[in-house]
Image (tube, helix red, strand yellow):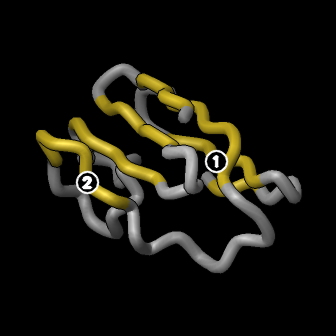
Amino acid sequence: MAVAAGQRHTVIVCEDGSVFACGYGEYGQLGTGDTTDMYVPTRVAGLPPLSGPVRQIAASGWNTGIVTDAGDLLM
């Protein structure tokens, strides 16, 4: 499990590679496809096909970065 906290949002990667996000979404940083705020961790279901499990995440004030085992980078 990995957790990254930005200025106004948090992103969680579970052991199975699933991603959850919560907090303010005004810039789309939650990855839900809109700018809705989420006050409970919500699964990010709209990830494109990945070439491996999600293993690293980083969050800043207005964006989130995800790295897979295979080296894919999503922002």
Residue at figure coordinates x 66%, y 52% from the top left = 54
Residue corresponding to mark 2: 42
Q: How many marks?
A: 2
Give neighbour class at mark 2: few <14, some 14-19, many 20+ (Cα, 10 Å).
Answer: some
Q: Given the image, on which type of amino acid does mark 2 rest?
A: Thr
Q: Is residue 44 left or right of residue 68?
A: left
Q: Given the image, on which type of amino acid does mark 1 rest?
A: Ile
40 vs 32: above or below: above
Place of residue 73 in the rendered image (x, y in percent of width and height, measured from the top left): 75, 54
Give neighbour class at mark 1: few <14, some 14-19, many 20+ (Cα, 10 Å).
Answer: some
Judging depth in this view, the residue of 15 and 40 nearest the camera is 15
Indicate the quadrant containing the N terminus: top left, top right, bottom left or bottom right: top right
Place of residue 44 in the rendered image (x, y in percent of width and height, measured from the top left): 39, 62
Residue corresponding to mark 1: 66
Place of residue 20 in the rendered image (x, y in percent of width and height, measured from the top left): 37, 49
- Which element type, helix, strand or loop, lies under badge 2? strand
Residue at figure coordinates x 32%, y 32% from the top left = 9
Place of residue 62 in the rendered image (x, y in percent of width and height, measured from the top left): 42, 36
Q: Is residue 58 left or right of residue 68?
A: left
58 vs 32: above or below: above
Mark 2–mark 1 contact, CB under 8 Å? no
62 vs 31: above or below: above
Judging depth in this view, the residue of 46 and 16 nearest the camera is 16
